[in-house]
């Protein structure tokens, strides 16, 4: 379609570009570009709004310009050039590989930085980070990148199966097992200087759920037994470059020992974090197959272990309920024994106090007879001697206190006042031949 500038100006002033453009086979954006190219002004959205409300609105004036016809040609879609199948496959593979490299499990963000903020460690020891709430990873500084890579692949594979890997909440009662870090299990342990090194572990286990069954997961770098030589004030590996470069005479005053040191190979351990359930399974690096290649087998084994773990957990719950019931029964028997002992003790103490009260009363009666006899004899004394003796007798009575038997019995405590049983007293058996109603 061919139009002059004036004709196109009149058309764009009579209708919005979005409604006018389809008449030319164009989009509103393409028609606006043509207007700008040929210096043709068109009303904006505010003009059409005011016009729809019946308000006055001014049209932009058409500036002077060429009167040459304008060709309005709808764009022709160009067919997309097909690329070779081999190139498309390569691009797709590269995109997939890049996506895998960039994919990281949310639990591992920032973990490397926290793991390297560690307490002082000697060569040949695992990292001991200050932060205690971290994924369950045990690694030396040199092997940490590979540990994070294996953990990332394993966590993502579990997530894709619907098993979300996370750190256990603090109040769910899950525990972390003792991790065996030796590649070849030995009876003795020689990790750390003087064989007393401690291996860091997180405060909470890393777990995931298969349905309702919790499973703990830990990844540890293993240790191997190596020979260490004491040289120049420190221990070095016997196969290290420093020791191999020494002359025989330089090794005269050195000695060797054995030590467990990180070997760069890893072991993944899945276990039951429920107390009382002894179940675990592990996979580790081998010369034939690295650990990351065993992830499909790990997923298959864990999925197949769900029913076994559920049975073990149910059995443990029943055993725990039985132990709790037995403990409560034993506690009740103990409390009943203690209650009976306290009742008997209260009775014995009450009887003893009553006997002592009667004995004191007997002594008091003897004193009372003494004072009564003294008062009778005082009646036969005259003069100043009588007055003196009466004062002495009053002082003696005041010093001894009350000799009233009711005062003695008032201070006595009955057995029920000393201790009252927490349990109902046993019912007395009915007499021979009598019924319960009688």
Image (cartoon, helix red, strand yellow):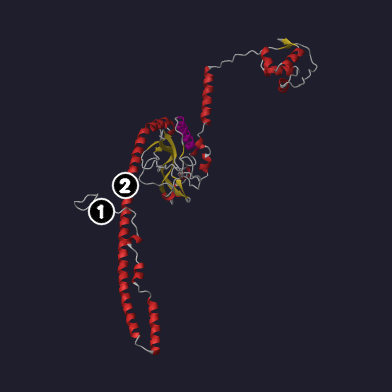
- Label number found at residue 62: none
- Quarter-of-image position of residue 378: bottom left
- Between disc 1 and disc 2, whose residue precedes? 2
Disc 1 crowd rating (10 Å Cα; few below 14, some 14-19, many 20+) is few
Magenta-drawn segment: 145-160
Residue 342: x and y, percent? 32, 59
Left or right? Give the position of 92 relative to 319: right
SS label for mark 2: helix
Q: Which residue sits at x=23%, y=52%? A: 430
Q: Nearer the viewer, residue 244 or 334?
A: 334
- Quarter-of-image position of residue 323: top left
- In the depicted structure, whether residue 394 falls above or below residue 320: below
Mark 2 = which residue?
Answer: 326
Q: Nearer the viewer, residue 407 or 196?
A: 407
* Marker count (numbered): 2
Q: Which residue sits at x=33%, y=42%? A: 319
Whether residue 305 can be seen here: no
Measure the C-alpha gap from mark 1 to mark 2: 28 Å
- In the depicted structure, whether residue 308 falls above or below residue 122: above
Q: What secondary structure do most residues of the magenta stretch adopt? A: helix
SS label for mark 1: loop
Q: Residue furthest top?
A: 1
């Amino acid at each position: 379609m061919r139009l002059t500038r004036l004709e196109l100006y009149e058309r764009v002033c009579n209708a919005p570009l979005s409604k006018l453009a389809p008449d030319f086979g164009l989009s509103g954006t393409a028609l606006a570009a043509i207007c700008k190219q040929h210096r043709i002004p068109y009303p904006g959205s505010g003009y059409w709004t005011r016009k729809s409300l019946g308000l006055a609105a001014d049209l932009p004036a058409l500036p002077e310009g060429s009167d040459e016809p304008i060709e309005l040609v709808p764009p022709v879609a160009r067919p997309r050039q097909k690329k070779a199948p081999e190139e498309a496959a390569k691009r797709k593979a590269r995109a997939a590989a890049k996506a895998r490299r960039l994919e990281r499990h949310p639990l591992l963000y920032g973990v490397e930085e926290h793991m390297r903020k560690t307490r002082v460690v000697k060569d040949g020891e695992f990292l001991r980070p200050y932060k205690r709430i971290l994924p369950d990873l045990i690694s030396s500084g040199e092997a940490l990148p590979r540990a994070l890579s294996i953990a990332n692949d394993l966590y993502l594979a579990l997530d894709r199966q619907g098993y979300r890997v996370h750190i256990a909440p603090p109040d769910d009662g899950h525990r972390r097992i003792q991790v065996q870090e030796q590649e070849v299990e030995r009876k003795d342990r020689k990790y750390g200087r003087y064989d007393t090194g401690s291996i860091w572990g997180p405060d909470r286990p890393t777990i995931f759920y298969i349905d309702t069954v919790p499973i703990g997961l830990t990844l540890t770098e293993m240790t191997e037994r190596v020979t260490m030589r004491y040289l120049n004030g420190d221990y070095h590996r016997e196969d290290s470059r420093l020791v191999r470069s020494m002359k025989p005479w330089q090794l005269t005053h050195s000695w060797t020992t054995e030590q467990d040191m990180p070997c760069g190979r890893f072991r993944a351990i899945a276990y039951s974090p429920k107390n009382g359930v002894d179940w675990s399974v592990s996979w580790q690096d081998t010369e034939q197959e690295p650990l990351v290649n065993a992830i499909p087998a790990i997923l298959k084994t864990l999925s197949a272990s769900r029913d076994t773990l559920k049975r073990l957990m149910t059995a443990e719950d029943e055993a725990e309920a039985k132990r709790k019931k037995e403990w409560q029964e034993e506690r009740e028997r103990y409390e009943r024994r203690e209650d009976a002992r306290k009742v008997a003790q209260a009775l014995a103490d009450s009887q003893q106090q009553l006997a002592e009260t009667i004995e004191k009363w007997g002594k008091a009666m003897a004193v009372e007879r003494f004072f009564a006899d003294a008062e009778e004899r005082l009646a036969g004394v005259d003069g100043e001697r009588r007055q003196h003796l009466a004062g002495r007798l009053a002082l003696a009575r005041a010093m001894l206190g009350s000799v009233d038997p009711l005062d003695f019995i008032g201070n006595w405590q009955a057995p029920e006042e000393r201790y009252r049983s927490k349990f109902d007293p046993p019912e007395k058996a009915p007499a021979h031949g009598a019924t319960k109603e009688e």
